[in-house]
Amino acid sequence: MGTALAGHPQVAFATAISGTHNLHASVATPSVDALYTYLTTLLADLPELRDLETNLVLQTVKGAAARPLADRRADRGRPTADSGR
């Protein structure tokens, strides 16, 4: 089901998770009406779908961003260009 879900053009991000649910997906639609249409047609047509929970993002306070390579190397104890090692 995860592969089918990831193939939907509305799905920006999909991942397998542990806990109450098995999958998490971030969906982007141009409107609430378009979200409703997606949920009640393309998504509802997946035969493996047994349960569905939706939440709307009202405001994003911090988005995902890559950390600079030097920061990631320092976390692993590796020398960085400015560490003098």
Image (spheres, grey):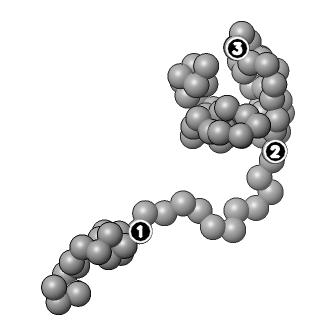
Q: Earlier in the sequence, mark 1 or mark 3?
A: 3
| Amino acid type, mark 2 | Asn
- Report how far apart the C-alphas of labels 1 and 3 lie in the structure: 37 Å
- Report how far apart the C-alphas of labels 2 and 3 lie in the structure: 21 Å
Q: Mark 3 packing: few (<14 Cα in 10 Å), some, or many (20+)?
A: few
Q: Could you tell me which residue is drawn at 70 percent across and 62 percent down?
A: 60
Q: Mark 2 packing: few (<14 Cα in 10 Å), some, or many (20+)?
A: few
Q: Could you tell me which residue is drawn at 32 percent across and 69 percent down?
A: 76
Judged left or right of residue 47, residue 16 is: left
Q: Which residue is mark 1?
A: 67
Q: Position of residue 13 (x, y in %)?
A: 57, 40
| Amino acid type, mark 1 | Arg
Image quadrant in which you'd find residue 22: top right
Q: Which residue is mark 3?
A: 48
Instruction: Report the front residue among 41 and 51.
Output: 51
Judged left or right of residue 74, residue 47 is: right
Image quadrant in which you'd find residue 79: bottom left
Q: Which residue is mark 2?
A: 55
**Does residue 14 appear anywhere in the picture?**
no
